[in-house]
Image: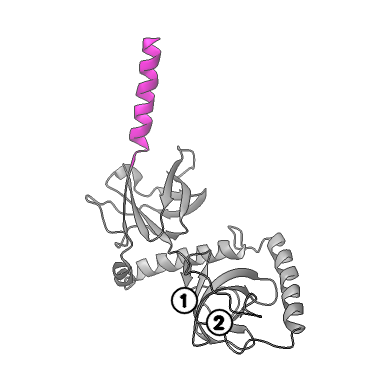
Amino acid sequence: MRKQSLFILVVLCFQIEAIGQDVSYSNTDMPALTNSMKNESTRLMYNRNLQFLFDAYAGYDKDGMKIKKEKELAALRINTLKENYGHRQKYPDSIATGWHIVALTDNKEFYKEAKVYVSKNTIQQLVIQDCIRVRCTKSQVKNAAGAITLTDINSESETLNVYFINDLDSAALIDEPMQPGYVSFWTSKGKYLKERLMINDIERDFISKLHEVEPGCFETGVPFYMLKPGVYKLRVTKTGNDREEKFEIKSGMCLKYQLK
């Protein structure tokens, strides 16, 4: 019995050493991110991450195809939206300054709830998934609607229409959306070099560089991701057969995840 217990303990220690990790949180350093974006590889990683988040929000599968159920549901909502707006006799003269919940649609097969910030009756900011800021063109609001273009990602539509469906009869202001969180992965162990990161069973980037000391969240050569706060699954593997770990994303924080 004692030998069996010892064997189990040795196995557990080996697993912990093989899949070990160390984590630390720090406040998101937005000036550092802005500075890092001057590097082309960092900018491409950020925009690729943003595109991934938008595709998941829009209802595309991992191959970039629109999920049939999403298209059918969007078509129903768009028809209802057109009916409600088409039958109205009066619209608000302007939209109150502040944050609002809106319908974001291409008027064909895309319809999602989003949040926007309005100032002087002009759409200034767009937020998807309750926290992800997406840069867009500014748009004047008329008849409780506007039209924007996303500047950093491909939405497969040159223009997306914004409808203030909750503000038709009176102002419906909401609290400012929470901030997203970030996670960066680094290691000093050669065994992880060229290994692929998998987050929630979806393949992401490779570990391409070793660091002897903890790097900054947005340092060149460090894979980092903007994510909605919550708990995520992680694998670091070429095959997907290793043990699964978990990590937590916190609003306004950057998690530095060391693979040991």
Q: Residue at x 29, y 67 (%)?
A: 32
In the image, 84 versus 158, the foreground residue is 84
Q: Residue at x 68, y 77 (%)?
A: 107
Residue 18 quadrant: top left
Secondary structure that dominates the magenta span: helix
Pointer 1: what residue? 135
Confirm or deny contact between disc 2 and disc 1 (CB under 8 A): no
Pointer 2: what residue? 148
Colour scheme shown: one colour
Position of residue 87 in the picture relative to residue 222 (left or right) = right
Position of residue 98 in the picture relative to residue 58 (left or right) = left
Seen in the picture, residue 122 relative to 218 is either above or below; the reply is below
Q: Which residues are magenta?
A: 1-21
Sequence-earlier tag: 2 or 1 = 1
Q: Quadrant of the C terminus?
A: top left
User: Measured from the top left, where is residue 196 in percent x and y?
Assistant: 43, 49
Q: Is residue 248 visible?
A: yes
Label 1: element kind: loop
